[in-house]
Every structure is written in C-alpha cells, then in structure tokens.
Image: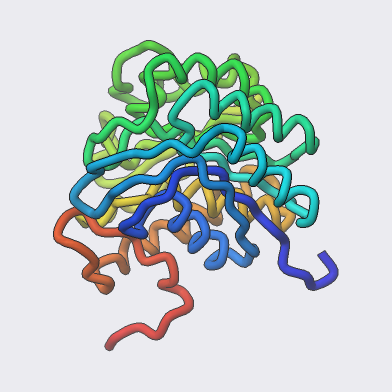
C-alpha cells in the first residue's frame, strides 16, 4: 500500500438514524483504516426504534454511482448491504462484473434488528444467483442463514456449520454464519461465528455483550471485514480482527446514549477519548 490509505466502497441503503446502513459502513471503514466511498441503493426513514418508510433508488442511478466511483477511485474492497429488489441486485452485479471487482463482502440484509423487512421475497433468489458467485465472503446471521437455505433457525453449532456449507455451495468464496443475535445450544455466554470455506471451517468466539445497543452490528462487522481485506489481510485474519473490534464497539455502546430504542455500536471506541 506504500503508506496510502486503501479505498473501500459500500453499496447499501441509507439509515437516517445513522446507526446502520451506509452511515455505519463509512464509520466502520474509517475506524478500520480505510477511506470510504458509497453507492446508495435505498433511502430509509429510520431511527433506533424502527423503519417507517423505504424509498428505492432508480436502477439507472445506482449504475451511474457505480460507474462514477470506479472510473476515478482505486477501490480495493467492496461491502454490499441492503439491496431491496431484483432489479437493483442485477444492476449491482452487472456493475461489479463490468469493473472486475475483487474482495467483495456481502451482508445479506433482510430484516432490521427491530424486525422490519428490508428485501422483497423474490429478490432473495436473485441475490443468490447474481451476487453470491462474485463474493469473497457472505456474512449472514442465523435468521438470514435460515432464510437463504429455506430451513429453520440453527439450534446448535452443527446446524450452523450445515447452513454455512449449504450457502458455500451457492458459489461464494466463503461464508461467515454469525451467532450473535440468537445464541445456539451451549453458547449462552458467548457470541460464536463460523467461517466456512473450501479450506475448511474455523470458529470465532467472543464473550456475549449484554447491551440493547445492537443496531447496525451486521453492517459494521461486514464493513470492518471489507476494510481489513482492503488493508491486505486474508479472510480469516480480516474476520478475526473485525470481531475483536466489534466486540469493543458493543462494550462501549452505552457511552453514546443515542435514541430511545436499540442504539448503535460505538464505532470509534478505540479513537475517541473515553470518560473515566
């Protein structure tokens, strides 16, 4: 990198409350030493208590944003988040193929932390067929992994591993099945994620943080992984570093006191002065 800050791009929806989506992605990039660029796919009227409205960006404007970024910026890694329709998914896939993009991290955003749906049912199959084969890693939580595999919520580590293998078979480079939102059997005291690739499986565990401030955790983790890939880490190293950073961000989330509902994590816990 010759000392230069690498560039990472987020392709996702905007969160007007600032805790998830594009806003969380850009904060995560900055906190993990990457310059952040963005392509906005949707606008949401959203805060810590939920989503009240969604406005999709026209597909031709999504394409225009992608072309504008890649024609000028040397993008090293891409994080993909909320893509609400099949048309937008196809437009993003076409743009990524056109610009021959590497280091793609896909967070298959389907519902918010508060349970609000963010992707149409018919778009799930398009996501799997059009974008998964382009991805270096896909990062579903337990609910998303179940939906992607048309199965039930994983109840134990073996079931998490099985769903990870099923998603890997869809053509992606690797799959990180995240256990943070719903503890499985035997993992009550820790948040355990499994990375499944063609080289095997690896578990990443951290103490479970007791906090309501979990808004944007999936966005933030996947963006941190993308930033770490942009900085030259391999996938296991990028995942390990991102998980350590996110655990710290969850532990410090109470210092922010943002909103009346599920607040955001503290993206800059390692950088901002801490209260005594």
* Viewer-nearest residue: 187 or 63: 63
Position of residue 219 in the picture relative to residue 234 (left or right): left
Q: How many marks?
A: 0
Q: Residue at x 79, y 55 (%)?
A: 72
* Viewer-nearest residue: 206 or 13: 13
Classify residue 163 by image quadrant: top left
Q: Residue at x 62, y 29 (%)?
A: 91
Q: Residue at x 46, y 23 (%)?
A: 161
Quarter occupied by the C terminus:
bottom left
Residue furthest to the right: 2
272 above or below 100? Answer: below
Classify residue 95 by image quadrant: top right
Q: Position of residue 197 (x, y in %)?
A: 62, 28
44 above or below 184? Answer: below
Residue 238 in sight: no
Quarter occupied by the N terminus:
bottom right
* Viewer-nearest residue: 127 or 273: 127
Residue 99 in sight: yes
* Viewer-nearest residue: 120 or 105: 120
Q: Residue at x 32, y 33 (%)?
A: 111
Position of residue 58 in the picture relative to residue 60 (left or right): left
50 above or below 88? Answer: below
Residue furthest to the top: 150
Q: How is the structure coloured here?
A: rainbow
Q: Position of residue 179 (x, y in %)?
A: 36, 36
Residue furthest to the bottom: 276
Q: Position of residue 248 (x, y in %)?
A: 39, 64
Q: Position of residue 221 (x, y in %)?
A: 47, 50
143 above or below 149? Answer: below
């Amino acid at each position: 990198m010759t000392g230069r800050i690498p560039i990472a791009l987020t392709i996702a929806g905007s969160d007007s409350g600032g805790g998830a989506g594009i806003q969380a992605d850009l904060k995560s990039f900055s906190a993990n030493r990457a310059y952040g660029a963005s392509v906005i796919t949707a606008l949401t009227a959203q805060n810590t208590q939920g989503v009240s409205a969604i406005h999709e960006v026209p597909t031709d404007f999504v394409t225009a944003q992608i072309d504008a970024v890649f024609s000028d910026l040397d993008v090293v890694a891409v994080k993909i988040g909320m893509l609400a329709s099949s048309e937008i998914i196809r437009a993003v896939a076409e743009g990524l193929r056109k610009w021959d993009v590497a280091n793609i991290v896909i967070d298959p955003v389907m519902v918010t932390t508060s349970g609000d749906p963010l992707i149409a049912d018919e778009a799930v199959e398009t996501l799997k067929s059009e974008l998964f084969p382009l991805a270096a890693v896909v990062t579903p939580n337990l609910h998303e992994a179940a939906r992607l595999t048309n199965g039930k919520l994983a109840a134990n580590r073996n079931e998490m591993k099985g769903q990870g293998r099923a998603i890997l078979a869809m053509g992606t480079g690797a799959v990180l099945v995240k256990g943070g939102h719903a503890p499985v059997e035997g993992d009550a005291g820790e948040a355990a994620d499994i990375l499944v690739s063609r080289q095997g499986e690896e578990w990443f565990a951290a103490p479970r943080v007791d906090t309501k401030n979990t808004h944007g955790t999936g966005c933030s983790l996947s963006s941190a992984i993308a930033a770490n890939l942009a900085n030259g880490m391999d996938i296991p190293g990028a995942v390990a570093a991102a998980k350590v950073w996110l655990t710290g961000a969850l532990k410090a989330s109470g210092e922010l006191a943002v909103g009346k509902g599920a607040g955001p994590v503290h993206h800059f816990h390692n950088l901002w002065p801490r209260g005594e």
